[in-house]
Image (spheres, rainbow, N blue to C red):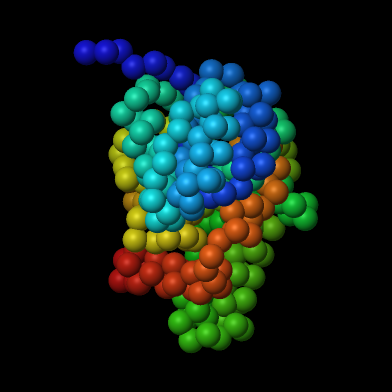
Amino acid sequence: MVERLKYTYIFVILVYRNIDDLRECIDSIGANVRDFRIVVVNSFYDETSREVIAHVAAEKGCDFLNVENKGYSFGNNAGMRYAREHYDYDFIVVSNPDIVIQRFDDSRIGDFDIVAPQIVAADGRMQNPMVVKECRLARILVYYGFKWNFSSLLFAGIALNKVRRVLSVRMHRNGLPYRIYAAHGSFVLLKKQVVDALFPVYDERMFLFAEEDILALRAAQTGFAIWYVPDVVIRHKEDGSMKLADFSTNAELRKSNMYFYETYVKGW
């Protein structure tokens, strides 16, 4: 039996056409992280983009995997499957290509199952913690807001989560990690034991959106904890792939959130 190479971190970067973002993302990993391997997963658009992304991966010393464009869940599951089959590791890092690592202090990361770093959006907003504590009322408001196309209900559910998040952030200004309910999906670290227990981690019946909800609920059900760890700082340029997508974002957002509630939450 051939012994597999061991890395502390395997980065799975799912790409859809946004080549310039990919280059900067890979360079930021190389500048800030030690003992890693990168798996670039190309969500196929056309042969031209596939060839360019494969070239970038080879140029940067990354593994390359081409998959059908079946969405976030399918592509990231494929990348994690490849990592599990080819390497040993401590963490898999699921990352968008439109992120730049600005700081990666991993001195405390090993203490946690799932790590949500500090993510700074393009407009300066903090995207983590995404949800501090699970709130059934907020879920109900969001679900029926989407189902009935009733924006007031939708915004009330979103606002309820936001208020809870703001209050929690104010209570945790000491810079120490703390436990949260859900992590933003643009950059999340999953310990090997979590990947093994939950694999396939994401529900491939969903094309895009609500993946964070799936991970949070499944982690809670299986006893894994998600922690906000501000020692890692990420700049999220936002929507690199979304700007290139060929479908209605709002329609997909509604579809995914309704599917999540009806499949995972209703009656639970």
Q: Which of 199 and 98 is in front in this view?
A: 98
Q: Residue furthest left?
A: 1
Q: Residue 132 in the image: x percent, y percent?
A: 57, 54
* Left-right relation of 267 to 224: left
Q: Residue furthest right?
A: 124
* Residue at 72% in and 33% down: 102
Q: In which quarter of the image is the C terminus?
A: bottom left
Tell how many labels.
Answer: 0
Q: Which of 67 and 99 is in front in this view?
A: 67
> In the rendered image, is residue 14 in sight?
no
* Left-right relation of 169 to 250: right
Residue 235 in which image quadrant:
top right
Q: Which residue lies furthest to the front in this view?
A: 48
Where is 70 relative to 25, above or below? below
Q: Residue 119 in the image: x percent, y percent?
A: 66, 45
Q: Nearer the viewer, residue 207 or 16?
A: 16
Q: Residue 106 in the image: x percent, y percent?
A: 60, 25
* Left-right relation of 12 to 235: left
Residue 239 in which image quadrant:
bottom right
* Residue at 62% in and 76% down: 155
Q: Residue 108 in the image: x percent, y percent?
A: 58, 26
Q: In which quarter of the image is the N terminus?
A: top left
* Residue at 46% in and 40% down: 41
* Residue at 60% in and 70% down: 158
> In the rendered image, is residue 96 in sight?
yes
